């Protein structure tokens, strides 16, 4: 068997999620509100909608290369 005979296994997102369902945990998202942090799940429906509509941006790094690690 040569290297050319090896075919990559392509799986959909749904297949991957189904295989690892038992390993998944709930992630609590916090956001800063009026000077302190609160979990988004405690917001009412209107505030949760506002949170989803917020524009997100990437701030340029400090130049030391640490931002390349996060991508």
Image (cartoon, rainbow, N blue to C red):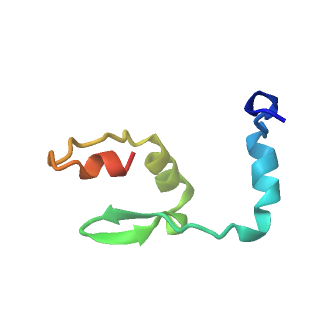
Residue 18 sits above or below residue 27 on the image:
above
Q: Which one is in front, 33 or 62?
A: 62
Front residue (pair 18, 6): 6
**Residue 46 in the image, given as x and y percentages of width and height:** 51, 52
Residue at 32% over, 63% down: 32
Q: Is residue 17 above or below residue 13?
A: below
- Whether 15 is drawn above or below 34: the answer is above
Q: How many marks?
A: 0
Q: Look at 51% across and 54% down and name the residue there.
A: 48
59 or 11, which is in the foreground?
Answer: 11
Residue at 25 percent of width and 52 percent of height? 66
Q: Nearer the viewer, residue 35 or 67?
A: 67
The residue lying furthest to the front in this view is 1
Say which residue appears at 24% left-offset and 43% top-offset: 59
Image side of residue 28 versus residue 12, left or right: left
Q: Position of residue 29 (x, y in %)?
A: 48, 64
Give the position of the C terminus as an image quadrant.
top left
Q: Quadrant of the N terminus?
A: top right
Quadrant hosting residue 11: top right
**Could you tell whether 11 is left or right of 71 in the image?**
right
Residue at the far top: name it. Answer: 4
Q: Is residue 37 above or below residue 9?
A: below
Residue 13's spot in the image, x, y percent? 73, 43
* Residue 70 percent location from the top left of the image: 37, 51
């Amino acid at each position: 068997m040569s290297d050319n005979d090896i075919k990559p296994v392509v799986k959909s997102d749904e297949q991957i999620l189904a295989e690892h369902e038992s390993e998944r945990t709930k992630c609590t998202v916090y956001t800063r509100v009026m000077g302190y942090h609160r979990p988004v799940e405690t917001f009412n429906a209107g505030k949760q909608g506002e949170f989803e509509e917020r524009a997100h941006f990437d701030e340029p790094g400090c130049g030391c290369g640490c931002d390349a690690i996060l991508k």
